[in-house]
Amino acid sequence: MKKLQHILSAVLSFALLLGSTTACEDRLNIEKHGNMGSMDEYYQTDADAEAALAAMYLSWRGLHYNWWFVKNTLSDEVWAAGGQRGDNTDLEKLNEYTFDTSNSMIQGLYSGLYSLIYSANLIIDRVPGTTEVMQRAIAEAKVARAWAHSELVSLWGTAPKVDHLLSTDEYRQPNGTPEDTWAFVEQDLTEAIESGALKSKTGLNDAETGIRLTLEAAKAFLGKAYVFQGKYDKAASILDEVIDSKKYDLYEDFDGLFHASANNCCESIFELQLRNDQDQAWNQWAMFYIMVGWRTDKLSVMGDAQSSVAIGTYGFMNPRKSAYDAFVAEEGVDGYRLNNTIRTYEQMEDFGVSIKSGNALVGSEGYFSWKTRILKSDLVIDQSYFQVLQWINYRIMRYAEVLLLAAEAHLQSGVETDKALEYVNEVRGRAHLPALTTVTMEDVKSEKRLELYLEGCRFQDLVRWGDAKSALGEQGKEIPQLGYFAVTDENGEVVKDEAGNPVYEFEQRWPYTNTNYGFQENKHELLPIPLREMEVNSNMQQNLGW
């Protein structure tokens, strides 16, 4: 069985997640060749439990794309961008607040969260829990189920709670309530924590235990749930337990933190696993990093950039000037964290990247995301024509967020506010910023915006803080474009040079507009229940404003 556990551990690292688990018995000694039995007969062994758990983590990884894009596109951090206007209309509509109930990315996230819940419920309801392996699987499934419900309630508010495997006559669930769903999130996480089945890392540099949900990850998720409900005393207490465990720390190299070399590092609370294995590469390919890399078909990539950065990426999610300006206001133009998060066009030119003559970047104010760039060292296989084979783990939560959530909790509770100052200064110290002598909620908000840029926190923070209207109310009114545009004469004719080639000028333009745009109060605080769900479920009521 030790061999089996070793194999299943590898499965859970997602390197082999997409394959079947291997039994200890002789592969030729198989009793069943056709019908492998019903669902009632499965989930009865440790091997079954581990295989089901691996499938659950794979389901989680499968929803990451929509989870990341929906939450970040709704924020004030980026332009949807892409190759040209209309390259991804559903992403643009999210970004500009022109979306409706039929948005495919909202539908994909909603369905993906319930798929994760279903995978978790299979384990919780079917695995008997008679062994240590089974008990751990059930505990991890409860943490995953709680995380999915916390996303549903914070984004949709009234999405149904699903606390068991539904029978066919239960498929049309009515709306849930935020109070009931949050209570269920707390219950699942508390039960998992108190079960004694979740493992803790052995130390800061234990990169193996953390490939699965740990005791401290469950506590971090619970602390975040408390913060979102305004239960600051409880949040401060449980988040302090994570911090006081001394099993996590800020990774020294902020730039390296977002690359494969830092997978499962000391700062990882939880991340979804990928692997540098060419034999498994096409079993784990994903569109995520090809989307957020620079639009390299419109760029000239030379020098240092050519030797280090992967090309063949699509250029979505360009930073906004307002985000860059927020960094400058806190750190200055030479800020360490700024320059490892966003680069200006002038900096890109120095690095060897420039827009090709005759080309323009939609959704660009001249700023490029440095944090999400793909390095050649991040590639399983370098495919400049279709760059979808990376092994950078998907970061769900890292220790810096725990520190900033704990700082908010202590500050808002009014208890041990000196800890709020300590935690904020710890984050600022890694950013090479001077320590504060006092700390306010505005300081916490600023640090969260800068430290967790493009990490799926900003939109929900703005909503729960009551700041969404002021930050997002004008979003989508105008959409920029940067690059080379053909010069025209007074008659609108394109000016040409002596060789008959069009003459271009390099400039910033704002050629696209919307008449309806921006975050609206009493509507966008919650996402709409997807149209498809409303069409098949007569027991559901749509959220306010939709």
Image (cartoon, rainbow, N blue to C red):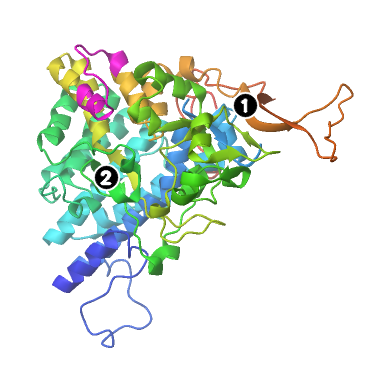
65 is within the stretch colored magenta: no
Which numbered tag is attached to residue 270? 2
Quote the CA–CA distance across marks 1 and 2.
35 Å
Secondary structure category for the residue under label 2: strand
Residue shown at the point (17%, 59%) measured from the top left: 134
- SS for callout 1: strand
> Of the residues shown, which amino acid type is indicated by label 2?
Phe
Q: Are marks 1 and 2 in contact (CB under 8 Å)?
A: no
Q: Name the residue under label 1.
A: 479
Q: Is residue 490 left or right of residue 252?
A: right
Give me the residue at 33% from left, 70% from top: 20
Q: Sequence order check: which comes first, mark 1 or mark 2?
A: 2
Q: Give residue 395's position: percent from left, percent from top.
A: 33, 43
Range covered by the magenta-colored residues:
424-443
Residue 476 image point, x, y percent:
59, 24
Q: Can residue 476 be seen in this view?
A: yes
Quadrant of residue 143 in the image? top left
